[in-house]
Amino acid sequence: MTKEVAALAAVQVPEPWGIATSIDIYQCDPATIRDADKIRRFVVELCDLIAMKRFRDTMVVHFGEDERVAGFSMVQLIETSLISAHFANLTNTTYLDVFSCKPYDPEQVADFATSYFGGAYRTTHVNLRR
């Protein structure tokens, strides 16, 4: 073993500080992603599912003059960080991000969100924050 390889082997990788999951859900149910109350209910149910404590009310705002980006955006502060999403009307796509320093199961979140929003398929990216 060379000195360089030994030095690299000795470096300790820090434990993850948090986990960030980005989920893009395609062909969602238009009625669900265009309903602010359903989006708020999703946040409550998701936080209950992954045992995250919500901080204040969920913010849900519709905006976007350009039809390409028009739709609701949602932000929910949680005790351990943040959940956010944008719902694109033109493509019926949900772009969901969950970031927390408290562990959770990204696949559980993706399955729940896909089912809730009636998506046909999704892509999921998980990033451990160090």
Image: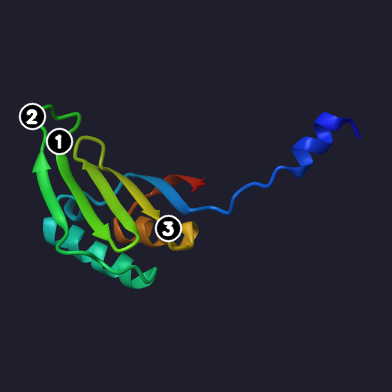
What residue lies at 83% left-to-right and 37% top-to-bottom?
A: 6
The residues bearing labels 3 and 2 have C-alpha atoms spaced at a distance of 35 Å
Q: Residue furthest right?
A: 1
The residues bearing labels 1 and 2 have C-alpha atoms spaced at a distance of 6 Å
Amino acid bearing label 1: Ala
Amino acid bearing label 3: Cys
31 above or below 3? below
Point out the tag, 3 or 1, that comes first from the N-terminus.
1
Element type at mark 2: loop
Disc 1: which residue: 70
Point out the tag, 1 or 2, that comes first from the N-terminus.
2
Instruction: Specify the quadrant that holds the N terminus.
Output: top right
- Residue 65 is marked as 2
**Is 57 situated left or right of 123 in this image?**
left
Element type at mark 3: loop
The residues bearing labels 3 and 1 have C-alpha atoms spaced at a distance of 31 Å
Residue 26 in picture, x, y percent from top left: 35, 43
